[in-house]
Image (spheres, grey):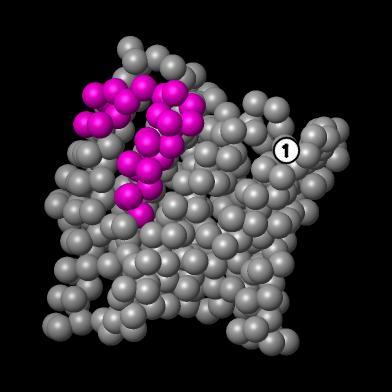
């Protein structure tokens, strides 16, 4: 759930991703970013029993702002806040806030391993929504991959397995669904506005929105030093994770980095087993494999089609 990833991916779509700048460094930064993402998810789950999700989100957004703001000012100077598509930005902010809120709320209700896997259906949702929202043509190969991927999701959500609620499932699927809407919106926004600027606006509005919700709901703020330290850790790590994502895409094409993000699945499963005593089931293993295979096929197929379009 990171601002700017689709902006950078859009450059890949426009054909500016063929020259590698620094593959070893870019991959190393990407692996660090993925690790931080899993660590943040584990920390959110760790504190979710004692701290309201809205409070966690407030700290996450507020503590992301300093680094993102500094980056935007460094890159754009006085134009750090300049936006040419305010309506598209508003939709990007709304879908991004809902997606992350669903993700954090799902962590409070479901195993970390399951929430991590469900979020990787984002690629499937993007492919499903792109024809309706962007007018993109999706061929039978990618449609087959989408159907197979959601089949793996149904296997993953085997009702007989238990351990989660309908609300948790809706939140777990709501996060990638709204995340896909955000990414589709960013495909439009990234053609006109800077990723650094859109990230500042997104995190700034997130801070304001969740601050208002915390005040209106009279949600308690952390009183213990340990909880406060964990919340600060979530915010600081999230800011570095976003920075790492953007930096890695400056070094290596998005088409190469995208499959690496599926490493978050075994990492998330491992963190769930080690930190929270979650059970690794056959449904999780088989369902995860199907989702990963389907998503990687879609990414590879999209890359082939872009190459063919450039060569024709």
The crowding category of the residue bearing disc 1, from other C-alpha atoms within 10 Å (few below 14, some 14 to 19, many at least 20), is: few
Q: Which residues are magenta?
A: 261-286
| Residue at 54% across, 67% down | 243
Q: What residue is disc 1 on?
A: 226
Prevailing SS of the magenta stretch: helix
x and y, in percent, of residue 278 in the image: 41, 24
**Is residue 162 rendered to the left or right of residue 203?**
left
Where 282 sits versus 208, above or below? Answer: above
Q: Residue at horizontal 64%, vertical 57%?
A: 236
Q: In the figure, 167 relative to 212: above or below? A: above
**Residue drawn at 42 percent across, 67 percent down:** 29
Residue 112 appears at what percent x and percent y? 46, 33
Q: Nearer the viewer, residue 191 or 275?
A: 275
Asked if residue 275 is among those painted magenta in the image, a careful observer would answer yes
Residue 128 in view (yes/no):
no
Residue plotted at (37% across, 36% down): 270
Residue 151 left/right relative to 179: left
Is residue 173 found inside the magenta-colored segment of the image?
no
How far from the left and from the top, in percent, is residue 55?
Answer: 73, 40
Query: Which SS class for mark 1?
Result: helix
């Amino acid at each position: 759930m990171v601002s700017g990833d689709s902006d950078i991916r859009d450059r890949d779509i426009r054909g500016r991703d063929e020259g590698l700048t620094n593959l070893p460094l870019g991959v190393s930064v990407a692996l660090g970013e993925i690790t931080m993402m899993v660590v943040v998810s584990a920390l959110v789950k760790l504190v979710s029993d004692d701290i309201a999700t809205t409070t966690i989100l407030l700290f996450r957004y507020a503590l992301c702002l300093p680094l993102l703001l500094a980056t935007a000012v460094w890159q754009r100077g006085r134009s750090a806040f300049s936006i040419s598509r305010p309506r598209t930005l508003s939709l990007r902010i709304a879908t991004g806030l809902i997606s992350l809120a669903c993700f954090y709320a799902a962590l409070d209700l479901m195993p970390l391993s399951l929430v991590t896997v469900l979020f990787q259906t984002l690629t499937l949702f993007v492919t499903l929504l792109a024809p309706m929202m962007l007018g993109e043509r999706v061929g039978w190969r990618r449609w087959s991959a989408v159907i197979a991927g959601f089949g793996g999701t149904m296997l993953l959500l085997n009702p007989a397995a238990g351990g989660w609620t309908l609300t948790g499932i809706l939140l777990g699927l709501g996060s990638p669904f709204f995340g896909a809407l955000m990414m589709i919106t960013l495909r439009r926004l990234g053609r006109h506005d800077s990723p650094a600027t859109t990230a500042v606006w997104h995190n700034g509005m997130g801070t304001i929105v969740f601050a208002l919700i915390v005040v209106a709901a009279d949600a308690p703020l952390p009183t213990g030093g340990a909880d406060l330290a964990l919340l600060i850790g979530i915010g600081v790590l999230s800011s570095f994770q976003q920075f790492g994502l953007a930096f890695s895409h400056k070094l290596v094409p998005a088409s190469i980095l995208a499959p690496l993000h599926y490493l978050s699945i075994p990492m998330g499963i491992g963190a769930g087993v080690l930190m929270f005593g979650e059970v690794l089931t056959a449904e999780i293993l088989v369902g995860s494999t199907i989702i990963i295979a389907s998503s990687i096929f879609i990414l590879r197929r999209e890359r082939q089609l872009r190459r063919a379009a450039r060569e024709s």
